[in-house]
Image: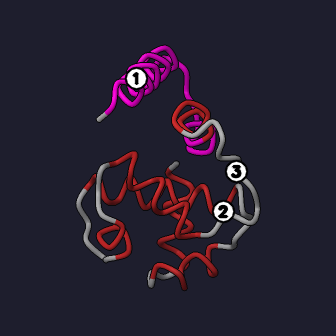
Amino acid sequence: MSLVDKDKRLELYQTIMAHKSNVINACEAIDLIESILYPAFSSSQDESVNDVIRRACLIYKIHPSDVLSKVKRRPLIDCRFLIWHYLSKKQRLSPAEIAKLFTHDRTSVYHGIKKM
């Protein structure tokens, strides 16, 4: 890990801690993290679902294949809900479309989106 990475991680930690008392939703959290870690990477409608999964997995430090599984451990569930919420709000995918991508039923996806 380079010195720049450490500085960015420290800045990210300080920013998140500063917002800790405020309620921020999943989209705002990802935008905040992107602005610190990936300033040259702009979020757009053309962004693939795999990119969203990859970025969320980096945040939670888990493997993308685990998120796509049906495992029900808390960090995986949180990451999955974050991805579903982001896809729903930013890319305007319906719960049924997201459910097909993740091999879950649409009601589970709807619940996950509401929980974020």
Amino acid type indicated by mark 2:
Ser
> Which secondary structure, mark 1?
helix
Number of other residues with Cα within 10 Å of mark 2, as a class: few under 14, some 14 to 19, many 20 or more: some
Sequence-first tag of 2 and 1: 1
Q: How far apart are marks 3 and 1 (CA)?
A: 21 Å
Name the residue beneath numbered marker 2.
88
Place residue 104 in its image quadrant.
Answer: bottom left
* Kind of residue sitting beneath label 1: Tyr
Circle 3/circle 1 CB separation < 8 Å: no
Tell me how the rendering is colored. Answer: secondary structure
Disc 3 marks a residue whose amino acid type is: Ser
Please, what secondary structure does the residue beneath circle 3 have? loop
Q: Which residue appears at 58% of the width and 69% of the height?
A: 49
Mark 3 and 2 residues: CB-CB less than 8 Å, in contact?
Answer: no
Locate residue 96 relative to residue 21 in the image: left or right.
right
Q: Give the range drawn in magenta.
A: 2-30
Q: Nearer the viewer, mark 3 or mark 2?
A: 3
Residue 94 appears left or right of 16: right
Residue carrying label 1:
13
Image height check: is 39 above or below 41? above
Q: In which quarter of the image is residue 59?
A: top left
Whole-percent x, y for residue 78 in the image: 38, 53
Considering every residue shown, the one lying at the far front of the view is 2
- At x 55% / y 30%, what residue is drawn? 36
Q: How crowded is mark 3: few (under 14 residues within 10 Å), some or many (20 or more)?
A: some
Residues 65 and 7: in front is 7
Tag count in the figure?
Answer: 3
| Secondary structure mainly formed by the magenta segment | helix
- Please name the residue shown 53% across and 81% down the image: 101
List x then y, in percent, for residue 31. Answer: 62, 39
Q: Mark on residue 43?
A: 3
